[in-house]
Amino acid sequence: MKSSSPAALRRSVVSSLFCIFGALSLSGLASAEVVKVGMILTYSGPEASLGEAIDRGASLYVKLHGKELPAGTSVEIIKRDDTGVNPEVAKRLAQELIVRDQVSFLTGGQWTPNTLAISALTKQAKVPYVVMGAGGSNVTWQQPYVIRVQHSVWQSDYPLGQWAARQGYKTAFTLVTDFAPGHDGEAAFIKGFTAGGGKVLSSVRVPMKTTDYLPYMLKAKEAAPDLLYVFNPGGPTATAFMKAMADIGITKSKTKIIGSGAITTDEELPNMGRAPLGVITVHHYSAAATRKANLDFVAAWKREYGANTTPNYFAVGGWDGMKAIYDAIRAQKGKVAPEATMAYLRKWSNPDSPRGPIHIETETGEIIQHQYVRRVEERDGHLANVEIETLPQTGDPEKQFRTK
């Protein structure tokens, strides 16, 4: 057999190496998994700060834990702006993410009306939806591809009504923002308060787009109840509400102000002056909580976003929601499938959330978590929502009443 020349041997070796590396490269491309996550939030307009809080919480989790994925797996987050409470826009964005971008997850969900519009699509398309924000009870009702990692308004405001009745308060006036979560808060508080023997004198709903709150506050002041129960979506609206109550004299009257946790949302407390001192809320999170997981979370937040910034409950929803998504990806070794994803998410838990231990109820997709009675106090020269009592929670009371 004739021997090959040195040049021919070199060409043969180089050709073989190209074939080997080419095969390895193609094999790597074939095994790589890019999991697309579509995130729909409000990134513009007057309520953009709430969407920003969710986004920052999710982004912080990704920065600290994003590399904890199976080998060859990466996550691509595609962000879209719903511009505010606009279900049609939210639905269109979700359709684009599902059909064009072929996302494996949807998340965000800042507003209940928008979230409900998106939820209907997830059932049809079989795309898991991890809700980080919306608090309306119907968000998870009969939605097999939806879980919520934020809260149901009923979870906090029904036990708030019960707690208020136990304290001996006899009369209340309710003042809520006129949208689905406000209606839930109103109904939840009234049910809990009246069941304990309390009486509601009157109920007023404030249009979402109004900026003149004084006429509504005046009705509450004139009623002179023992309690004024308040619900609003938080953010700058919470500060506007609190300042209006101070301007009209309610904050210094004999009427006790109580409400959903958003009315003294942590990041807005510095903007409220001293008006919220003594306000009682029931909620699932406070940035002032002394749990180690929360101390670590707040410290990481301040390192990332500035020492003068404070995470709120929306931020924790973003953090826990992104952890749930990453945990589901890890559990499936990067090869996610809708049914397997939902089977995992419907049993997901996080014993070390900044808010305390949480888990998802298999039957409803609803989060189960503690609620905390909080009082606004001055700590180290600034106001804080100080947890004074823990109310163990088993789920969404509204769904339990609905199924009885």
Image (spheres, helix red, strand yellow):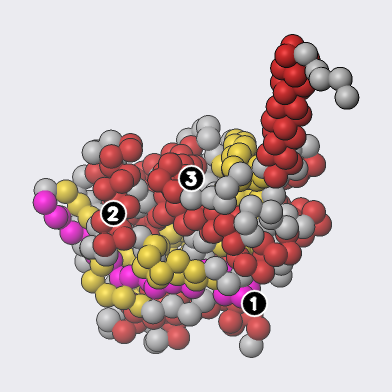
In the rendered image, the residue lying farthest to the left is 380
Indicate which disc, 3 or 2, sits on the residue closer to the N terminus. Answer: 3
Say above or below: 153 vs 247: below
Q: Are marks 3 and 1 in contact (CB under 8 Å)?
A: no
Question: Any magenta on residue 39?
Answer: no
Residue 329 appears left or right of 9 = left
Residue located at (31% from left, 84% from top): 166
Residue 196 appears left or right of 397 = left
Q: Which range of residues does the magenta coloring cover?
A: 361-380
Label disc, if present, on residue 363 of the rendered structure? 1
Nearer to us: label 2 or label 1:
2
Q: Amino acid at mark 2?
A: Asp
Q: Are marks 3 and 2 in contact (CB under 8 Å)?
A: no
In the rendered image, residue 189, in percent from the top left (x then y), is placed at: 45, 72
The one nearer the camera, 335 or 349, is 335
Say above or below: 282 vs 58: below
Give how far apart the Cα atoms at labels 3 and 2 are: 19 Å
Residue 223 appears left or right of 399 = left
Question: Any magenta on residue 372?
Answer: yes
Give SS at disc 1: loop
Label disc, if present, on residue 67 of the rendered structure? 3
Q: Main secondary structure of the magenta part?
A: strand
Q: Amino acid at mark 3?
A: Lys
Give SS at disc 3: loop
Give how far apart the Cα atoms at labels 3 and 1 are: 32 Å
